Amino acid sequence: MVVYRSKIFSVLTVMLLAALLSGQPGIAQPAAAPEVAISVDKNPIAANDTFILTLTVDQLVNDSEWRPQDALPNLQVLGSSSSRSTQIINGETSEQTTFNTIIRAPSDAGNYTIGPIELLGTRSNSIELEVLSAAQSDQLLDQRKAFMRVELARTELYVQEQVQLTAKLYLAANLHSGNIIPPKLEDADIRQVGRDNESTEIINGRKFQVFSRNFVVIPQRSGEQVIRGPLFQGQINVNSNRTLFPSFSSTESITTAAEDLAITVKPIPASWPPQSNWLPAEIVTLSLSVGSEGSKQDDTAQQQFTQGEPINLTYRLTAVGPLPDQLPRLDELVASLAIDGASIYPEAPESAVNQRNGRMVSQQTVRVAIIPHQGGELVIPALPILWFNTQLREQDRATAPAQRFSIVAASNASQLAAPAEPPATSAQTTKEPARVPTSEVAGTERLKRWQILTVVFAALWLITLIWMLWLRRAKPSAVTTEANPEGAGQQQELRAIKHACMRDDAAAAELLLKRWVRARTGADNAQLTQLTNTLDHAPLRSQLEHLQRCRFAPGQHEWHEGKALWRALQAALKAADKKDSSGKPVNDLPDLYPN
C-alpha cells in the first residue's frame, strides 16, 4: 500500500514539473520575431498636407520603443499616439500595439519612399508616397474629406506688430468632434480672438462645411521666420454598412493641416527716438478726466480749487493692437511732468485687455492726485505719447491736453487768529460742547473711544458749569467766574488732534487739523497749507508735507510720525506767541494740553 502511494506521488510530481516547465516562456523555445507593418491614411497627398502613418506590431510594445523623428529624419513629425489591444478567440490570445503618427507631407511635389522601419529587430514594409503640387492638389477635392486653408493679413511687418491670421477648416462630412491646434512661431505671442464662424461653400460641385477661426500673431524678434500652419485633429461621421440601421453612423479619425507661412519681421526703425517706447498699433488714444472720470476736459477749461486741496486726474491710454505689457507706464510719464507750485502723486496703473471686432484692445488707467502749494494759476502740461501707426506705416502722436486751474490762496495769519464771537447767553453756552470735532469722524472705528471720552468730558463740564452758576447765585460777592467757553472748545479740539496723533491715525489727524483751522478762520474749505503759511514753522511744515505724502502717494504708506507732528504743532504755537512784539498773543488759543 505504501509502495503504491509513493508511485502515485512520483507520477504527480513529474506531471507538475512538466506543467511548470511548459508555462515558463523563458525556458521554452524563443518567441518568434514580431510582425511590423506600416500604412498611410491617404495617398496621393497634397504638398504640405498632413497624413497619418500607422505602425502596427503584433505584440505589446512600450512607447519608448517607437521614436518617429529618429526613424523618419526627412519628414516633419507633428505628434504621435499609441493604443494596445488583447483578444482571446477560441482559446488563442493575440496582442497588438498600434502607433499613429501625424506627419506633414513635403512641400515639393514628387514620389517619396517611407520605410522600411526597423523595430524590435524586425523590418517593416515600404510605402511609395506620391506628393502632388498645389495645382495638382485641386484634383483631390473629390476624394478629400477634410482640408485646411490659411490667410495672413500681412507677410511683412515690424517687430511686436500684431497681424491677423485666419484658419479655415473644410469638411465634406458632418463633424463629430475635433480640435484646431493653433499656429506656432518661436518667440511670438499667438492668441485666438473672437468666436468661430460656421458657413458652407460649394467647391467643384461638392458642399463643404467651413469653420473659420481668427488668431493674432505678435512676433517678438526680427528676421525671416516661418509660421507653422494650424493643425486639425478630430472625427467625422461616416455611414456604416455593417449595421442593420442605416440611420446610424460610425466615426472616422481624420487629420489635416494648413500650409506654413513665411513672414519678414522688420526691426524698430532707426529713426525712432531712443527715449520713446516702441508702440506699434492701429489706433492709440490718450484721454484725461478731472474729478469724476466721465467729465473730460479740454485745454480751455479752467476750474477753481483751494490751495492744498487735492486735484484728482485720471489718464486713460487705449491702444488697438499691442498687448498691455507693451504700453508705456503712465505713472512714470505723469510723474515726469514739470508742474510749478504743486506736488504730484500718481497711483499704480491698472491694465486690461479685451477683444473687439477681431482685434486686441489694451487699456491702461492711472489716477493722479495733485496738491497745489500756492495761489494763482496752476498749469498741468500736455502729456504726449509717440506711437507707430501700422495702417499708415509712420509715426503718430496721442496727446492728453494741458489743463489750467485757478487756485485760491489760503487765508493769512490774521484770519487764522480771529476768534469766534463769544456766546450771548448762558443757554447758548451750554450748547458749545456740541461742537466736538469727533462728530465728523463718527462711524470710524478708531475714534469710538474718543467719542466716549468726549461725552463724559462734556457731561462733567456741564455739571461744573451748573455748580458754578449755583455758587454765583448763592454768594455773588465771593464767587467770580471768568469761564471762557471758546477756550474750552479749543482745548477739546486740541485734545482730539493729540489723540489722533498719538494713535498714528493719518486720516483722523488730517480731518481734525482741517476742522481746527476752519473753526479759527471761518473758511468753508480750509487746508493744511493755511496752517503752515500762518505759523511759518519749518518743522511743522515738514511734518504736514509728510502727512500728505502718506495720504496721497501711491501704494501703502503707513504713518508713524504722529508724536512728531504733535510736538511740532506745540512748538509752532509757542513760537507764534513769542513773536508778538506788542505783548498780545498772536491768537486767542489757550495753553496747549499738557503732555
Image (cartoon, rainbow, N blue to C red):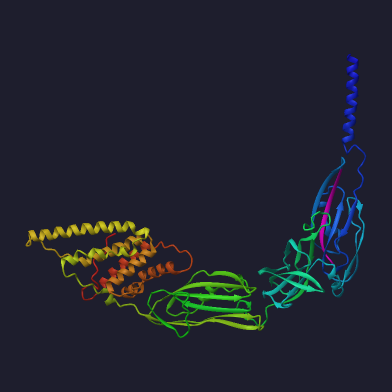
| 288 displayed left or right of 38 | left
Q: Is residue 484 visible?
A: no
Image quadrant of residue 434?
bottom left
| 577 displayed left or right of 34 | left
On the rendered image, what quadrant is the C terminus found in? bottom left
Q: Which residues are magenta?
A: 93-105
Image quadrant of residue 327?
bottom right
Query: Magenta segment: does it hold 104?
Result: yes
The residue that appears at 88% across and 50% down in the rendered structure is 120
Please tell me whether residue 302 is drawn above or below residue 566 in the rendered image: below
> Which sits in the foreground, 113 or 325?
113
On the rendered image, what quadrant is the N terminus found in? top right
> Which sits in the foreground, 338 or 403?
403
* Residue 74, image x, y percentages: 86, 64
- What is the total number of numbered labels drawn onto the structure image? 0
Q: Residue furthest top?
A: 1
Query: Magenta segment: does it hold 69?
Result: no
The residue that appears at 57% across and 69% down in the rendered structure is 352
| 433 displayed left or right of 268 | left
Image quadrant of residue 567?
bottom left
| 77 displayed left or right of 190 | right
